[in-house]
Amino acid sequence: MSARVRLDRRQLLALLKGMKRIRAFEAKCAELYQAQKIRGFLHLYDGEEAVSVGVMQALAPEDAVVATYREHGQALARGIPMNVLMAEMYGVREGCCRGRGGSMHIFDRERRFCGGNAIVGGGLPLAVGLALAARMQGRSGLAACFFGEGAVEEGEFHESLNLAALWRLPVLFVCENNRYAMGMALERAESETDIHAKAAAYRIASEAVDGMDVVAVAAAALRAVEAVRAGEGPRFLECRTYRLRAHSMFDAQAYRPKEEVEAWRGKGPIVRFQKWLDGNGLLHPSDLAAIEAEIDGEIELAVAFAEAGTPEPVEELERFVLMEEVPA
Amino acid sequence: MSARVRLDRRQLLALLKGMKRIRAFEAKCAELYQAQKIRGFLHLYDGEEAVSVGVMQALAPEDAVVATYREHGQALARGIPMNVLMAEMYGVREGCCRGRGGSMHIFDRERRFCGGNAIVGGGLPLAVGLALAARMQGRSGLAACFFGEGAVEEGEFHESLNLAALWRLPVLFVCENNRYAMGMALERAESETDIHAKAAAYRIASEAVDGMDVVAVAAAALRAVEAVRAGEGPRFLECRTYRLRAHSMFDAQAYRPKEEVEAWRGKGPIVRFQKWLDGNGLLHPSDLAAIEAEIDGEIELAVAFAEAGTPEPVEELERFVLMEEVPA
Amino acid sequence: MSGPQRLTYREACRQAMREAILDDPRVFLMGEDVARYGGCYAVTKGLAEELGEERVRDTPLSESAFVGAGIGAAMDGMRPIVEIMTVNFSLLALDQLVNNAATIPHMSGGQFAVPLVVRMATGAGRQLAAQHSHSLEGWYAHVPGLKIVAPATVEDARFMLKAALADPNPVLIFEHVMLYNMEGTIPDGTASVRLEGAKVRREGGDVSLVTYGGSLFKTLDAAEALAAENIAAEVIDLRSLRPLDMATVLASVAKTHRLVVVDEGWRSGSLSAEIAARVAEEAFFELDAPPARVCSREVPVPYAAHLEQACLPQPDAIAAAARALVRPS
Amino acid sequence: MSGPQRLTYREACRQAMREAILDDPRVFLMGEDVARYGGCYAVTKGLAEELGEERVRDTPLSESAFVGAGIGAAMDGMRPIVEIMTVNFSLLALDQLVNNAATIPHMSGGQFAVPLVVRMATGAGRQLAAQHSHSLEGWYAHVPGLKIVAPATVEDARFMLKAALADPNPVLIFEHVMLYNMEGTIPDGTASVRLEGAKVRREGGDVSLVTYGGSLFKTLDAAEALAAENIAAEVIDLRSLRPLDMATVLASVAKTHRLVVVDEGWRSGSLSAEIAARVAEEAFFELDAPPARVCSREVPVPYAAHLEQACLPQPDAIAAAARALVRPS
Ligand SMILES: Cc1ncc(C[n+]2csc(CCOP(=O)(O)OP(=O)(O)O)c2C)c(N)n1
Ligand SMILES: Cc1ncc(C[n+]2csc(CCOP(=O)(O)OP(=O)(O)O)c2C)c(N)n1
Ligand SMILES: [Mg+2]
Ligand SMILES: [Mg+2]
């Protein structure tokens, strides 16, 4: 386990809990999807938890976050309360977006969580603009932009990296390289599969990190954030990970062998980190029980909150199509 | 003067004539623009002649060419007769596109000249498709795609290079790096100014060549074309050149110092090559006289042809909006 | 292949592509996840295994590049079928379609044709929210140089592709996402349909209901409901959105003297406006009542089911609009 | 700055931007060649020298990225003015405008606004051929969440920007390329105009000519010609294409009972269809004649001058359309 950062036991357990919390939340979502409480697309993060948990702990409240449609992990790790998130999945008014966005479009102004984007690559230009705003307003915040390796194939990736680097803007580009874009394996989609190397074409300093190692991600994210804050311009962080479940809820996964998935499951970020904590005597059985109990309780409350939610009245359908004022 | 290719005197004089012919044709066009015989945008190639002349001599009839809106040089070097080109500038029916395309949209099916494109970067995907067609039909032709360094900033550049490299398609990417995109200097527009280095991000072999040296361009083009024909996939050729005139016809050129332009004029591809031929006793005064006389005669005939042209009847306006058949 | 067959719209699309690729070496399919994944709506499942990945090509996530590549390939002897997963993503390729596919034949003075077919899913109804629920086929129908069709029946899904591939022009085929699971019967695997021309899907003398694509069956349901009230609605399926077969629409209006246009696009500036305007221009004195439109609410389509459904044209709203024309209160 | 001033449309656009940037630290301008080059139509000449390249930013040729960056900056406290050189290139940024700018406020449940202004040139008339002569503002007017305006006078060019920047929503401003050299008089540099609302530019009782942008002056010329024939045409400048001020249009039609819509867009699916459809729906019994439209021919605009002019709405065609309604033969 790489640990170029000094994390005390409390912090390490927080990382473990952060990942388990996402995993458990999504397991519940999958269940609720079968029960048809949640509809539309549901993109699970199973296997990728270390990325959001590792990166978010390096961010500050003044930083802005641009997410993807596979964003529950990003949202929870950023601190969006589980209950408003679950309510959003239910499509009720108590959801963080009043049930209008659903799983793919989580927004939380208070936490500067600027939205899940369902157009692959569509969030990258927004992050550049958020960073530009911070710079022009003399604020210290940066913009962290999450996207998959598939987004790297879109023209907006190219345009956004050039613009951020050219203007030396405070953007942290975080590529969640889970090796597949729906059924498209990276090596079948990109002539250069070493994604972090592409950053060089824009003179952006980059690092590739084992995205299944939460401590390694945390350490790399801290290094990158430090550099961005120091005014060195954008940084690029490629997190090498794996999607253990279907792309969305309907997906026969004919495009990859079951053995491959199984092999990766063994390298999963949670089992692996838990084993490491155990091996180093940092995880007491009581800790684990406590963490799991807390998470179960939180999920229970979130589901109850969502179940008690109310549909937004149809009369409000046109509200916010046009804004009456810019929220302060 | 680099000359890694063996060119005999006849060939060398052909290169000189090719460049002078473009220069003279465009000087006449500028004059006709003032006289309002030619309208719309007129993008001159003054200073960049070595690029088209050097590259085109490396191509075969079965190759396809995708051009830009700064394309007179590309069109003439490819062999489009000067008279139908001039007629097109006049907007008469005898023009290669019946006067519908004008300066920015030259097409010539017979010479597989697949159009000037006036959307920066818009031609790159077409070239990928032309190469794909050749490959799927088992034809030996490649697709040569011309574009400026400004096009490198567009997302389509990124998407097209990846696709061509991924599928190992026979595309020759030719970047005419004349250092400016309208008033935007390369270093103000791109975080990485070494354009040919960007090709590495797609695993495309590339070469940067002095675009003011026609023999160097010719040699590099031959090397690149050979590699593409050998099935090695796409090649990228960056030709470093300079635009000696305004971007189009109205342009105060406040964005660059006059001295810079003057300095480059001294390094112009024609003066330079002519001096070299002279110095090596390859250019007899009679040759020069003959070349110039031929060119003057050709231009005179082209202007006469265009002047004698007839406007396309308005009744034919809707013809070809929808095709009745695919031209054989 | 001969004799009547019962199949889904999805299966009809698949059979049509399979047949086209088998019949013509110039035809190939490319798009995101069309091969190994089998298509985002499972339309192309099995095609790559049978026909090979040279003819059924997975592309990178580069809409502009692979659509442009389809145009280039079509200019030089191929007959590509390009699949854009959904119309929502086609915005990223719009420049290629509008500035290249639609202009090159005319701009080149007829030297180059672009015999390209682009298929894409369109429409809302699956709770996919604002970025995944657009109905923008009306936009494309605005562009000279393009042909736009919207198969609304299993038969058209099965046979329009062949007609589109036989056309020397770029043809965009819009498949409504809610139709893929619909079942229908085709006369025979070797039948054919015209690419253009509207069809009367139900005859009636009291009011003309003009629609296309995913709204056809909602409109037929409305007609059924109206019949119970002794209102005979004629239902016209435009099939082709560009060119428009106004003759069929005008003939119907000449009979019914009343028009309701049903369009899932946002009302303002939707295709329904063109239909209503043309009828008003060309059959003004035939109309006994103002033309009416039933369209989507002018809102980014929300995720919540009840809000999404409130956005879309529904049979009862269609019936109400027709009723109001036939029996003004 | 006070007292009447005579200036060109170009100068009015420049003054408006200069004033906005000087008045509000949140406002900045970015786009291709807006700084050192002075703008492709010389609209921004001198601004960078005076205001600095932090507030007047040249961007790379990356329409999608810098438009999206404008959206992001607008979401977080800035008031960007993004210039897209022309509507022709805006197709490359359409995804950002339709899927982000137009959806984020609603999709986020009102948490985020996008107070962004996007300016672009539109229209034909300069012999720039098919890829550089589009009039696609009607497309944008179809999208809920966007506001679309088309200043047709020097006064609107001078003052609409301020109103647009004061609006909490994304506003797209379309400037017709043929208007930049037009001269006009403004009352006073400190005046103001409303962002929305149509204006009657000429009063008349016989026929309503509804238009906007670059077609306004052609339409006024037609009205002048009609006056010579004792036909009093009322000319309405829509000013705002979304939302549409139908009240003003309907009031005029209630007076004239005749409608001609003039729109440089291609006829089928243009904004003119929406206007004609709305009038037919809402003022059907007021109309004494079918609504008429004068639009562009459905052709990629060619380079040759005579062909280009044949594509576009012209005063005589507008007058002829009006005449045919008032004096049917
Ligand atoms: C522009 C665009 N094209 C296609 C899609 C359909 N789509 C949704 S997710 C996805 C795969 C994206 O893969 P990646 O970026 O690697 O993210 P991951 O799903 O692996 O997290 C695709 C193709 C889309 N949403 N947007
Ligand atoms: C997509 C797009 N954006 C902007 C323009 C306007 N424009 C025309 S030429 C040009 C400069 C292009 O520079 P470059 O690619 O280097 O070619 P060069 O003119 O130098 O030959 C620009 C910005 C355009 N035609 N297309
Ligand atoms: Mg992925
Ligand atoms: Mg250049």
Image (cartoon, coloured by chain):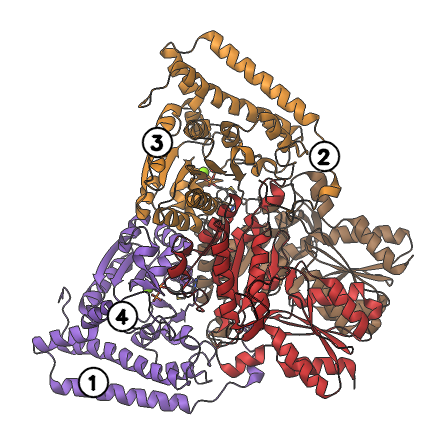
Chain colours: A purple, B orange, C red, D brown
Q: Is mark 2 within 8 Å of ligand 2?
A: no
Q: On what subunit does the disc labeled 1 rest?
A: A
Asked if the residue at label 4 sits under 8 Å from ligand 1, the reply is yes
Asked where in the image residue D144 lies, by quadrant, the reply is: bottom right
Single out the mark in the foreground, 2 or 3.
2
Instruction: Compute the Cα span from label 2 to label 1.
Output: 82 Å
Image quarter hosting the N terminus of chain B: top left
**Of labels 4 and 1, the one closer to you:** 4
Q: Quadrant of residue A123?
A: bottom left
Q: How far across and how far down the image is residue A163, in percent?
A: 39, 52
Chain letter of mark 3 equals B
The kind of secondary structure element at disc 3 is strand
Image marks 2 and 4: residues in contact by CB distance under 8 Å = no
Mark 2 vs mark 3, CA separation in Å = 43 Å
- x, y percent for residue A175: 30, 61
Q: Using the rendered image, report if marks 2 and 3 lie on a common chain.
A: yes
Cα separation, mark 2 vs mark 4, equals 65 Å
Task: Please name the residue that numbered disc 1 is placed on.
Answer: A291
| Pick the front one: B203 or B25 | B203
Where residue B311 is drawn, which disc sits there?
A: 2
| In contact (CB < 8 Å): disc 3 and disc 1 | no
Amino acid tagged 2: Pro
Name the amino acid type tagged 1: Ile
Reading the image, the residue beneath label 4 is: A48
Spot occupied by residue A5 in the image (x, y as percentages of width and height): 15, 66
Q: Secondary structure at mark 4?
A: loop
Circles 2 and 1: CB atoms closer than 8 Å: no
The amino acid at mark 3 is: Val
Q: Earlier in the sequence, mark 4 or mark 1?
A: 4
